[in-house]
Image (tube, coloured by chain):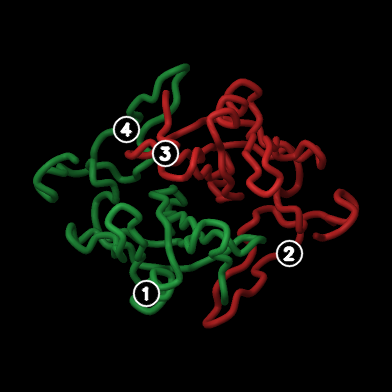
Chain colours: A red, B green
Amino acid sequence: MNLDYTKLDGLVPAVVQDASSGRVLLVGFMNDEAFRKTRESGFVTFYSRSRNKLWMKGESSGHRLVVKEIFTDCDVDTVLVKAESQGPGVCHEGYESCFFRRLDGENWVVSEARTYDPKAIYGSTK
Amino acid sequence: MNLDYTKLDGLVPAVVQDASSGRVLLVGFMNDEAFRKTRESGFVTFYSRSRNKLWMKGESSGHRLVVKEIFTDCDVDTVLVKAESQGPGVCHEGYESCFFRRLDGENWVVSEARTYDPKAIYGSTK
């Protein structure tokens, strides 16, 4: 069950995909402790590089991600978590997915509507 | 159209998702040149950390990935590429997706059959 954390200074990228729709919701990083916590708690838990600590997604918003299945890749250096969101969106900017900007020619354009008001949850949009 | 490459020493993680099925096929890394090459050529191109050079996925196998749409996330530090595979599988071990191992209790178990014989394409399984 060991993952290869050596390529990224103790981390592996973790892709979270909606278990029902297949939509890619966000990508974070896990260290070994975050990966164990994800398994043990059943909620997706990342390692925050900026805050330098474990970060259970949704711990402040309540929009947690319930783990359904976990996969790893051929090199065992990335994980894919199929999860169910407990909220209307995972993105702190108010969208269902963090990948709400699509490349259109030379520009990133917002390609969908917000699913909730981030100010009501986080107090500000950023 | 700029991405934030500062968090990962000049790279961003790039998730490739099958444009039709929504399956996550693989995760690689792109530097700015790989990202430009991906856009200009229309084929998914990574930066190989082990070989230290650009790597168009499928350049040796012929199993290239045709770009359909490109998204970025709220922090502009990750890309999601929806693509169409030109081969029976993207994984050099013979599977449709590199994420062919599922966590079952304490063990990673192969959760699907190979879609092609990697020896016929690459000469060996690794």
Reading the image, the residue beneath label 3 is A6
Chain of residue at mark 4: B
> Which quarter of the rendered picture does the C terminus of chain A lie within?
bottom right
Q: Secondary structure at mark 1?
A: helix
Reading the image, the residue beneath label 4 is B112
Q: Position of residue B2 (x, y in %)?
A: 57, 74
- Is residue B11 or residue A107 the one in the foreground? B11
Mark drawn on residue B85:
none
Q: Position of residue A86 (x, y in %)?
A: 73, 37
Tags 4 and 1 touching, CB below 8 Å? no
| Both labels 2 and 3 in a single chain | yes
Circle 2: residue type: Ala
Residue A29: which quarter of the image? top right
**Picture residue at 46% right of the left edge, 54% below the top:** B15
Mark drawn on residue B37:
1
Q: Secondary structure at mark 4?
A: loop
Circle 2 Cα neighbour tier, 10 Å, few/some/many (<14 / 14–19 / ≥20): few
| Both labels 3 and 1 in a single chain | no
Circle 1: residue type: Lys
Reading the image, the residue beneath label 2 is A113
Whole-angstrom CA distance, mark 3 to mark 1, is 28 Å
